[in-house]
Image (cartoon, rainbow, N blue to C red):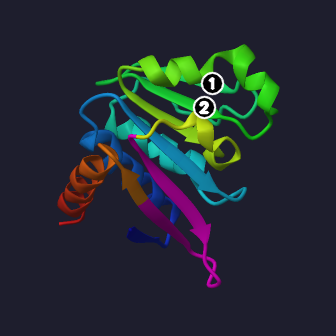
Amino acid sequence: MWIVDLRHVDDTRALGAALGRAVGGPSVVALVGDLGAGKTSLAQGVGDGLDVDGDVVSPTYTLVAEYEGRLPLLHADVYRLEAHELEHIGLEEQLEDWPGLALVEWADRFPELIPPDHVTCQLRVTDAGGRQAHIAGAGRGVALIARWRTELDAARS
């Protein structure tokens, strides 16, 4: 597990931007964390790293948003969904065929939705009021994390 301290929202966005630069093909990242933990800020940074045109905003009410960039970005939020509603929006099929990076906020609500090759990024609020990202990968997600760390280290130097 990779743990990153995020003292400010800019740190969260920088972590996201490094992910956007690191991704090279179809990838799924499960974003987990309480309200206000920084999931959307991380997604905004990913948009920066992917050179997305326009602003990445929370898809809380639209459920799924798509953005064009160096690679396409799919940003989903399943917080308000019930299990039977997943079938109606076709998110599982989108994740299977998505050619770029797919971010799924509140992915822990529907773990069966996330493919075996993925990265999980859990954002936590610390007792001191800061944030931490706890990042783990499975399958091809492990290699993505290695590239992500390299990108973040390069940006910090």
Q: Which residue is mark 1?
A: 64
Residue 11 seen = no
- The kind of residue tagged 1 is Val
Q: Is residue 121 magenta?
A: yes
Name the side, left or right, on which 123 lies relative to 52: right
Q: Residues within 10 Å of mark 2 (few under 14, many from 20)?
A: many
At 22% from the left edge and 63% from the top edge, which residue is drawn?
Answer: 153
Name the side, left or right, on which 107 lies relative to 56: right
Quarter of the picture containing the C terminus is bottom left
Name the side, left or right, on which 13 lies relative to 84: left
Q: Position of residue 123 (x, y in %)?
A: 56, 61
State the residue in front, 72 or 111: 111
Name the side, left or right, on which 74 lies relative to 37: left
Q: Position of residue 57 (x, y in %)?
A: 60, 34
Tag 2, which secondary structure? strand
Q: Which residue is mark 2?
A: 76
Q: Position of residue 103 (x, y in %)?
A: 50, 37
Q: Is residue 88 above or below residue 115?
A: above
Report which quarter residue 48 is drawn in.
top left
The answer to whether mark 1 and mark 2 are in CB contact below 8 A is: yes
State the residue in front, 14 or 93: 93
**Which badge, 1 or 2, comes first in the chain's sequence?**
1
Give the spatial CA distance, label 1 vs label 2: 4 Å
Region of the chain picked out in magenta, as a range:
117-135
